[in-house]
Image (cartoon, helix red, strand yellow):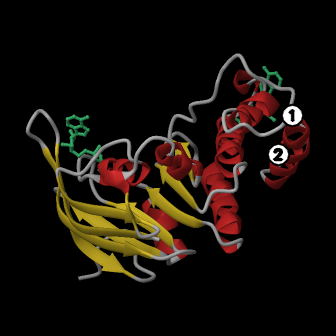
Amino acid sequence: MIRMYGVTKIYKNGVKALDNINLHIRKGEFVFLVGPSGAGKSTLTKLVFREELPSKGQVLFNGKNVARLRGRDIPMLRRKIGMVFQDFRLLPRKTVFENVAFALEVTGVSPREIRRRVPQVLQMVGLEKKGQFLPAQLSGGEQQRVGIARAIVNDPVLIIADEPTGNLDPETSWELMELFQRINEKGTTIIMATHAWDIVDAMKKRVVALSAGRIVRDEESGGYRDEA
Ligand code: ADP
Ligand code: ADP
């Protein structure tokens, strides 16, 4: 699904955020991206979403060079990817239902289809009774469930989550991980940048560790820290 060949990213200020990354992620994988702050995790995910372009090398999404996409191919790519953020990024004046519906409206889905699909995903994330609440009326964990509902409502092939539990307590974090796990079991690929070492250690998924812009470890069912 995703291939990176010799990808280097140097920002305008001269910072080399990624240094010769080679990476292959297959459909259906659950990949934890770990490493200290500044290691390049966010930059790597931004290259997949085409929020940033590589300075060198290639990023392929389903065989297509992301940098060469033009015009309407870019929204088409982004529609295949659901993003989940540490700070949720919900629209504060819209209800839970409207936040999720908005993700469908912008892709031109009919009102009838929206009325059908939004309750389905709210059910999936356990918020079927909270559709008319505003984000501020929800706990942090519930707000992130809205973020996840919004990410999955377009039926993406990939979910990119950037420290999705960074603002949540351990118990809530675990509940959300179970939700991500269920989404992954339905076939959606997940790439998750995280510092939640206990969760990474327990879930035994693929771990790609970055340090100073390089991949320093890539293990099937790995842990947060190097064993050696
Ligand atoms: P991580 O997600 O692992 O914390 P980032 O990808 O955010 O790492 O950052 C990698 C490096 O790139 C850091 O040194 C960071 O300061 C720098 N960086 C990130 N975004 C930008 C930007 N837009 N402009 C300049 N430097 C950036
Ligand atoms: P947590 O302890 O997980 O942070 P909260 O105490 O924030 O949870 O919320 C507990 C429950 O009360 C949640 O289901 C939330 O939706 C509801 N709730 C919180 N604040 C409000 C509010 N201002 N109006 C209505 N319901 C609320």
Q: Residue at x 65, y 54 (%)?
A: 176
| Outermost residue toward the left in this view | 14
Front position among marks 2 and 1: 1
Instruction: State whether label 1 is within 8 Å of ligand 2.
Output: no
Query: Of the residues under marks 2 and 1, which one precedes in the sequence?
Result: 1
Task: Answer left or right for 190 relative to 143.
Answer: left
So how many labels did they put on this image?
2
Of residue 23 and residue 214, the one placed in the foreground of this image is 23
Q: Residue at x 33, y 53 (%)?
A: 68
Residue 39 image offset from top left, x and y in percent: 23, 53
Crowding around mark 1 (Cα neighbors within 10 Å: few <14, some 14 to 19, many 20+) is few
- Secondary element at image label 1: helix
Q: Residue at x 73, y 33 (%)?
A: 105
Which residue has dot 2 on it? 122
The amino acid type, in three-letter code, at marker 2 is Leu
Which residue has dot 1 on it? 111
- Secondary element at image label 2: helix
The vertical placement of 79 against 137, above or below, is below
How far apart marks 2 and 1 lie (CA) works out to 16 Å
Task: Answer left or right for 158 relative to 62.
Answer: right
The amino acid type, in three-letter code, at marker 1 is Pro
In which quadrant will I find the C terminus?
A: bottom left
Residue 150 image offset from top left, x and y in percent: 68, 42
Q: Residue at x 51, y 43 (%)?
A: 72
Residue 138 image offset from top left, x and y in percent: 74, 30
Q: Quadrant of ligand 2?
A: top right
